[in-house]
Amino acid sequence: MTVLLTVVFAVLFFALIMVSIALHEVGHLLPAKLFGVKVTQYFVGFGKTLWSTRRGETEYGIKAIPLGGYVRLVGMYPPEKKGAKQTWLTRIADQARAFEWDEIRPEDDGKLFYQKKTWQKIIIMLSGPAMNILLAFLMFLGINLFHGTYQATLTVQQVSQCAIPLDREERTCTDADPATPAVDAGVLVGDKLVSFNGVELTSWEQMGDLIRENRDGAATVVVERGGALVTLPTVNTVLNHVPDRLDPTKFIEAGFFGVSPTQELTKAGPITTLRQMWSMTKQSAVALASFPVRTWNVAVDLVTGQPRDVNSPLSIIGASRVAGEISTAENLSAGSKVASYFSLLAAVNLFVAILNLVPLLPLDGGHVAGALWEWLRRQAARLTGRPDPGPVDTAKGLPLTYLVGGFLLLVGIVLIAADLISPIRLF
């Protein structure tokens, strides 16, 4: 029964991801129609068409491979410049242009994407990622309002007894290991941290930053104990390797004190939700920068039979599988299951938005970059008295489109294979 429920909730999660992708494309569709761009297709999925219907000039439908979606905006490529020098790049661009312009009719003049104003192009392209960000915000806000999220407090839950070098596999204290600064200072479980070197503390994150920046300097800590303020003896924090805040898979040399916080389920509103999302966005951006290397490591581990790193990237298949496990975990309450399930879905939406903002074709950010470059060229020409250089020929970006598209396809195949053969298991 548990296996069946895991599969059911995994399939449901996959379906919700596809709904998110469909809404991402709606984000492009609505402003495109609002600005008068001719839209011929709106499809969820790729490959063979399973179902479609036509409304006006647009065909809406579902395709057989549920791994994405697209909106076809007519006139993405401007017409060929007369007298342009023929190179391998212009030949590739002209072939793609000819394919698109076969279906463009004289009555489409004024409805082509390349003819629209820069700000309209940018809105059309950014509205897809904006839809995912909105979905993520609404889900995170719902979790914060009705269930809450576990937040680190300034109350000490655990005091580490010794500072163990990071490169040592054995994580138990030995007589040779020095006591942590927290032990030397006399910190007790249940103490509430009040100040660090005279700085009043407002959050655990602030405390962590102060400790890291202190490196091996002197540290005077004030705690609240039994209703009274107690100034602990001054000690020196020690240098140790600690997880990087933006990329927990990496370690940096920083100050170490030796206390862990109590986690409390805390409800919050829109402002706190936005702060949480901003922190997640920075972490996701760092993860995205190392995405190729991390995917390569997944492939190597898969080929060599090494165990899967729990922090490795997931495909939507892997994320769905994790969601299924969350839904049937015995050590979570019903409320925590729902919150974790939708928190994962919100995180997927946020990552999809960030990925699409990368300024490379064929991603949305690549088209935004093209529109901005076009605007800059026109402004520079206007200021220098030169003629309008015309629209940027995005067809010449096709080699980059093929390269990035091929890379994303390869990454998808590797991660899906890893998620099927060597899945990450949380429980």
Image: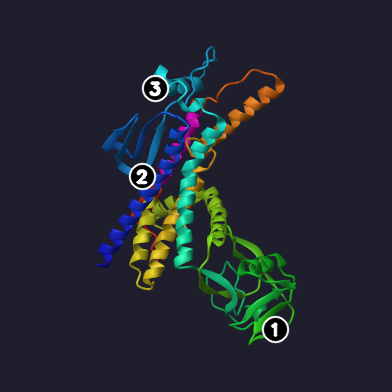
| Left or right: 159 in relation to 102 | right
Question: What is the span of residues highlighted in magenta in the rendered image?
Answer: 396-412
**At which x and y percent is residue 310?**
45, 61
Split into 4 quadrants, where in the image is the C terminus? bottom left
Residue 400 on the magenta segment: yes
| Left or right: 330 in relation to 390 | left
Residue at the far bottom in the pictured view: 226
At label 3, which amino acid type do we have? Phe
Query: Is 84 above or below relative to 395?
Result: above
Q: CA distance from mark 2 to mark 1?
A: 57 Å
Q: Secondary structure at mark 1?
A: strand
Q: CA distance from mark 3 to mark 2?
A: 25 Å
N-term mark: 3 or 1 = 3
Disc 2 versus disc 1: nearer the observer: 1
Q: Residues within 10 Å of mark 1 (few under 14, many from 20)?
A: some
User: Label 3 belongs to which residue?
Assistant: 99
N-term mark: 3 or 2 = 2
At label 1, which amino acid type do we have? Leu
User: Label 2 belongs to which residue?
Assistant: 67
The answer to whether residue 297 is seen in the rendering is: no
User: Label 1 belongs to which residue?
Assistant: 229
